[in-house]
Amino acid sequence: MIQYFLLFVLSSGLVLSSDCPASCNCPMQGSIFCINLPAPIVPRVPTTTQNLYIFQNAIITLAQEDFKGLVELELLDLSQNDLTEIPDGVFEMLSKLKNLDLSTNQITHISKGSFSGLVQLERLYLHSNRIQSIHLEAFEGLEKLLELKLQGNQLTSLPSLQFPSLLLLDLSNNNIPTLNPSDLQTPHLETLKVASLKLTTLHEDLVASLKNLHELDISSNQLAEVPRALKHDFLKGLTKLSLAGNPLGDLRVEDFDKLSGLQELDLSSLNLQGFPPHFFHTFPKLKTLTAAKNPFDCLCPLAWFPVWLKEKKVILERHEETRCHFPLVNAGKMLSELDHKDFGCPSTTTLQMGSPIGSTPVPQLPYTSPRTTHTNAIPPPPPPSEESLSPKTEPPVFPSSTSGQYEHFCPPNICLNGGTCYFDPVGELGCLCLSGTFGLYCENVDDVPQPPATEDSIVTTEMPDKLDAISSRQVTSTSILLDLHRFIKTQPHIRGIKLTYRNLSGPDRRSITLNVPPTYPEYTLRGLKPNCTYSVCASPLGEKINSRANNSAEMGSCTEARTEGIPMTSSEPWVETQTSMTYTLIPALAALALVLGLAVVAGTIICLRKRKQANSGLELDLGPTHPDPMELEGKTCLENGGNGTTPLKQPEIDQCFTPQPLPYMQQNGGLDYVALLVQGHCPSNNNVTSLKPSYF
């Protein structure tokens, strides 16, 4: 008897093991997994199979015989194969099928009979194919369909989708620029995803017919403003909204007044610099916020945001991608991790009075200056409190700059690019910008083209190889252009670059530190002093370095550069010209002096000879060529014009700088040389009233 029982058990085990096809896995009764089969065909499975998974098998075609007898089948997964079409009636015998997954294939068209016979179908997944067209009657008979996924295809239009029970519809990543109200006749739809369709508007009538909508994704379209359809009462039940990746411009609170039930909101990639005041008061039920990839200005008006996240316990999704863009001191930092002091807000001053409640902070009252020059970034300081003034003194209407009741405070690093923080007479904070910069905080720099590099403006610093990570490319009298390409390549995972520079030529050698984002391969140090040597060092942001180091090697990767001197004024070239002319005239004047000396000697000799002839009455021959030194006293004769041909006396060039035209001096009938004859009144020749140039 026992032998018969064992034989029955063994035979039953053989039957059970034979129900699972070869190369397949049967983890539970009724479910079969056939993955990476040796042959690209649909395997034969028992007729009692309820869930059949045959994905990743490179199956190319389907036939009715592949599913013959599978009347109990409820789930069929044919995803990640190589199907190019769905033959008409191929699933006709699967009358109990509820879930059909045909995603990630190569299907290009859906014909009229592709899904005929699937009267119980609830979920149809056709995403990630190459579907270009769908027959107008392809979905007829699918009355119980709950989910339809068509995202990631090549559709340009839709047939009329009439699904009375449909809850989820995903049409994302197609090329359907317009959705008409007649395209969607789905009154119970809860989730609509129409991202990346190139939509320019969202039809109000379309949204009005979707009164049961809970989730709406209209991200990555071409919406220039928040759709008007969101401003009506149609979507009171909406709990999840994505507007990411649209060129919406600035957000306005009134555009979201009707969406008070939102619990999840995606505002990523909207080019937002901040949020309007009280923007999130519209969403009291908000639990999750996504605001990644926006260039946030982390200034005082946004200081409330991290505090609000913590107080309301709102989850900031993709917080590592939600970072500051401005100012430079906060650039690259995660917005949610900043403290209130990091936003550069003015510190509040608590005024105390002599009463028992003097320790209570005085509330700051709103104040409006008569001048309409308030900035949006930092509020003006409050006026003095009435309690802090003398009881006999009338409180001033406006705060006085000389009252001394309010201590002005400039936040550190609030002014960029070398700007200087200041307060105007009514107490408003501002920045005095250097030449070439502008903006509320001197954050903008004029794009002035750099002058061509010269030998003097390019400084090549001989440094060790380990210090060549940064270099100076171009140097002017007040700026140094730094090349950080190699430094960034050697530090690929840094959060930022810490630049430290100091003036090695001046008495003040204290270091100045700047934080630069790693996205800046070049950076220009401005506001430097002319004709000075600067040491510039770079290190990864957050790395501790010796700021009091005596040499550059201890401070990271360093370089040295010397700024140019102050350009010469327009009068200096004239002085150089005068000097060159003077050097040219010296030989000419020397030659002229020699000729004049010879003329004086010759004139003296002639004068002496005539005197001797007059005294003796005899006609004498010419005397010697070298007269007695005492005879040179005949200079008086020349000055009185004794012989009618008077050589000009040479003035002192060093004391008289009046240049005159160059006369032509001829001797013996030929052109000998060109000399400058000076006329005028000079201190060295004031005994001559008027001198004229002589020609020999």
Image: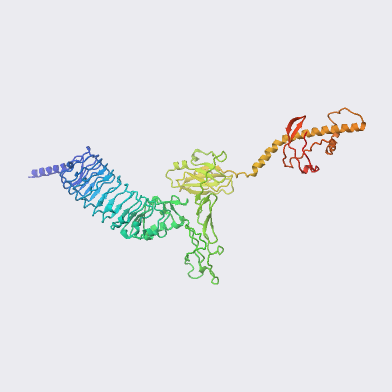
User: Residue 614 in the image: x percent, y percent?
Assistant: 91, 33
User: Residue 286 in the image: x percent, y percent?
Assistant: 35, 58
The colour scheme is rainbow
Quadrant placement of the C terminus: top right
Q: Which residue lies furthest to the left in this view?
A: 1
Q: Which residue is painted at 53% across and 64% down in the image?
A: 399
Q: In this view, does 96 lie to the left or right of 104?
A: left
Q: In which quarter of the image is residue 241?
A: bottom left
Q: In this view, does 75 lie to the left or right of 153?
A: left
Q: Nearer the viewer, residue 62 or 413?
A: 62
Q: Which residue is painted at 29% across and 58% down in the image?
A: 211
Quadrant placement of the N terminus: top left
Residue 545 appears in the figure: no
User: Residue 269 in the image: x percent, y percent?
Assistant: 39, 50
Q: In this view, does 661 lie to the left or right of 298?
A: right
Q: In which quarter of the image is residue 186?
A: bottom left
Q: Which of 492 and 216 is in front in this view?
A: 216
Q: In this view, does 481 lie above or below 616?
A: below
Q: Which residue lies furthest to the right in this view?
A: 616
Residue 181 appears in the figure: yes
User: Residue 165 in the image: x percent, y percent?
Assistant: 23, 54
